[in-house]
Amino acid sequence: MQVPILKQGPYLIATIQSALSDADLVQLRDDIVLRVGRLRSTGVIIDVTALDVMDSFATRTLRDIAQMIRLRGAETVIVGIQPEVAFSLVQLGLSLAGVATALDFEEGLAFLDRQHKGAGARVRSSGERSMRRE
Amino acid sequence: MSAAVSPGLGPGDKSKAESGESCIPIASDLDIIKARQTGRTEASKLGFSSTDLTLIATAISELARNIVMYAKEGEIVVRLVRSAEKQGIIVIARDRGPGIADIRQTLQNGYSTSRSLGLGLPGVRRLVDEFEIDSQVGQGTVVTIKKWKTR
């Protein structure tokens, strides 16, 4: 099942809606990294609220996505990691070190807005500078 | 931890499905999802907490992933234990892949022969109550995990 990626102002929003196969995750990675350039996005929110399991592959792929997006000049925030999933990640010894996370979509958006404001020099075009949530 | 050679390696000795036992053939990434969802559904019949259900599903996901990655194919058997003293779930991951030469090393944190994993088995071990691995080079690997329901 593919993950829809929506554009909202300067941000891209990917909401995972069901369990993802490895192929779906790789597809998400490739799509999002491509689109962040095409749409000149400055931030990406990946909503994993619906994920009931995050195993080593999913965690690594999300970390890869965040790092690739950063190399493309934008910020990623992963939102909605469930308490049980957080616990199993810690038990498993996996971490999302270096990746921004937020409680939910709302907080993720607020995080990107702060980054967006604070990083004037990094914003690609002045036209997008003042854009906020639509 | 036992590192003994198991006589019943490989999917050939598929024992007859007892009541409460499910066997999921593993050959692709889609089967990984199927296996962990089956495990979660089965374990929920015993009334495990949602945290435990997630730990069980995650452990199964890792075991199934190991099969796909190292052995290409195999199977995951999920069995419920409902005795008077104990209730829990047993998951057996079985393949006829290359086997593991040095189990001790594999169980060390951070060790992996595949660049993509690195935490597989030691991680799984931390998610469950009992962990056992039998492997023989050239024959295959059987990993058995157990999670007991705490009362």
Image (cartoon, helix red, strand yellow):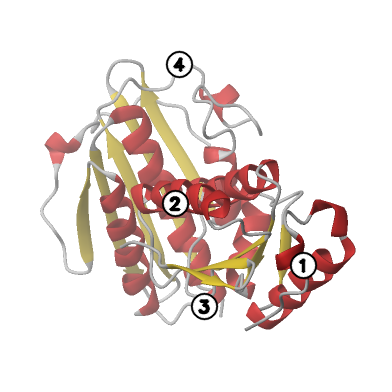
Determine which quarter of the picture holds residue A112. bottom right
Quote the CA–CA distance across marks 4 and 2.
39 Å
Q: Are marks 4 and 2 on the same chain?
A: no
Label 3, label 4: how far apart the Cα atoms are: 36 Å
Query: Which of labels 3 and 4 is toward the front?
Result: 3
Between label 3 and label 1, give the one nearer the viewer: 1
Amino acid under disc 2? Asp
**In the rendered image, which residue does mark 3 sit on?**
B50
Q: Earlier in the sequence, mark 2 or mark 1?
A: 2
| Residue B141 percent location from the top left of the image | 34, 30
From the viewer's perspective, tell me whether residue A94 is left or right of residue A28. right
Callout 3–callout 4 Cβ contact below 8 Å: no
Tag 3 near tag 1, CB within 8 Å: no
Seen in the picture, residue A120 relative to B76 is either above or below; the reply is below
- Callouts 4 and 1 on one subunit: no
Distance Cα–Cα, label 3 vs label 1: 43 Å
Residue B37, quarter of the rendered image = bottom left
Instruction: Please give the residue where the numbered disc 1 appears in the rendered image.
Output: A129
Residue type pointed to by label 3: Ser
Amino acid found under the numbered disc labelled 4 = Ala
Label 3 and label 2: CA atoms lie apart by 33 Å
Residue B32 is labelled as none
Circle 4 residue: B101
Question: In this rendering, is residue B102 above or below B31?
Answer: above
